[in-house]
Image: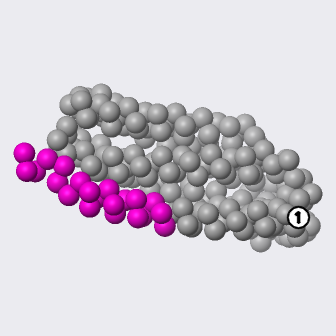
């Protein structure tokens, strides 16, 4: 019994500390966005209308649903059902790739129309629109990187489930993976209205 939840508190504390640094990172970007929105409200509104709200909505649904299946995976392993835990975690992984593929096509469309950082077409626009797209590529790109890292961690968690390193007596890694994934989901819930539903 002494090995059950080994270093549970230490692992949890380390993860919460890491998540706090992530909140500081994106929190600073949100503050920067707000300050420029206050300065260039019309330009931000005009540029925001050019983003495809269907892409944004699809990605929101994918991440929210993936968080649900992540929670189901953790609950399943807590109950000792490794098979269901793996299935739910695999669905989470698939939805992560749906998000990334969706983002690839969305960014691809913008690049196709000559809208990307320092592009001649973008630099011809008003300063507020240039700043909007600069923030859009930085913030959604950084978030996309977090989704990719999260997907890699999920793949590793699936491997640990397969070799039974994650089980009903030791599932801290899966819980920490879930915490990270829920934060990725939460950040997108803020990014979505800021860029796609700006009024």
Q: Is residue 52 left or right of residue 163?
A: right
Q: Residues within 10 Å of mark 1 (few under 14, many from 20)?
A: some
The residue that appears at 19% across and 49% down in the rendered structure is 5
| Colouring scheme, one of rainbow, by chain, secondary structure, one colour | one colour
Instruction: Tell me which segment is drawn in magenta.
Output: 1-21
Q: Position of residue 4 (x, y in %)?
A: 14, 47
Residue 69 image position (x, y, % from top left): 43, 33
Foreground of the two, 70 or 90: 70
- Residue drawn 52% across the image and 51% down it: 184
Q: Residue at x 41, y 49 (%)?
A: 179
> Image point 60% across, 35% down: which residue?
61
Q: Is residue 83 positioned above or below 3 on the image?
A: above
What secondary structure prevails in the magenta region?
helix
Residue 95 vs residue 131: left or right? left
Task: Tell me residue 94's x, y (percent).
Answer: 46, 37
Q: Quadrant of the N terminus?
A: top left
- Report if residue 94 is visible in the image: no
Q: Taking 61 as reference, is 170 left or right? A: left
Q: Does 19 lie within the magenta span?
A: yes
When the figure is inspected, residue 193 is found, relative to residue 31, above or below; the finding is above
Image coordinates for residue 78, horizontal then vertical, percent? 25, 35
Give the labeled residue for mark 1.
40
Whether residue 22 is visible, yes or no, is yes
Magenta stretch: includes residue 113 = no
Foreground residue among 173 and 56: 173
Looking at the image, which residue sits at the far left?
1
Q: How many tags in the picture?
A: 1
Q: Is residue 159 above or below residue 27?
A: above
Query: Closest to the observer: 113 or 18?
Result: 18
Mark 1 residue element: loop
128 relative to 140 in the view: left or right? right
């Amino acid at each position: 019994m002494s090995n059950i939840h080994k270093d549970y508190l230490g692992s949890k504390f380390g993860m919460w500390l890491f998540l706090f640094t992530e909140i500081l990172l994106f929190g600073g970007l949100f503050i920067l966005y707000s300050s420029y929105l206050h300065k260039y409200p019309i330009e931000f509104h005009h540029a925001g209308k050019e983003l495809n709200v269907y892409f944004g909505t699809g990605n929101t649904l994918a991440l929210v649903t993936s968080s649900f299946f992540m929670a189901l995976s953790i609950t399943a392993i807590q109950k000792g059902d490794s098979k269901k835990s793996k299935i739910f975690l695999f669905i989470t992984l698939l939805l992560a790739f749906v998000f990334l593929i969706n983002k690839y096509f969305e960014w691809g469309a913008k690049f196709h129309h000559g809208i990307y950082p320092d592009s001649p077409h973008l630099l011809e626009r008003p300063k507020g629109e240039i700043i909007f797209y600069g923030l859009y590529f930085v913030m959604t790109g950084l978030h996309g990187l977090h989704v990719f890292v999260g997907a890699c961690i999920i793949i590793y968690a699936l491997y640990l489930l397969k070799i039974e390193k994650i089980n009903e007596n030791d599932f801290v890694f899966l819980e920490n993976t879930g915490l990270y994934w829920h934060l990725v989901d939460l950040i997108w819930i803020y990014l979505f209205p800021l860029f796609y539903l700006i009024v």
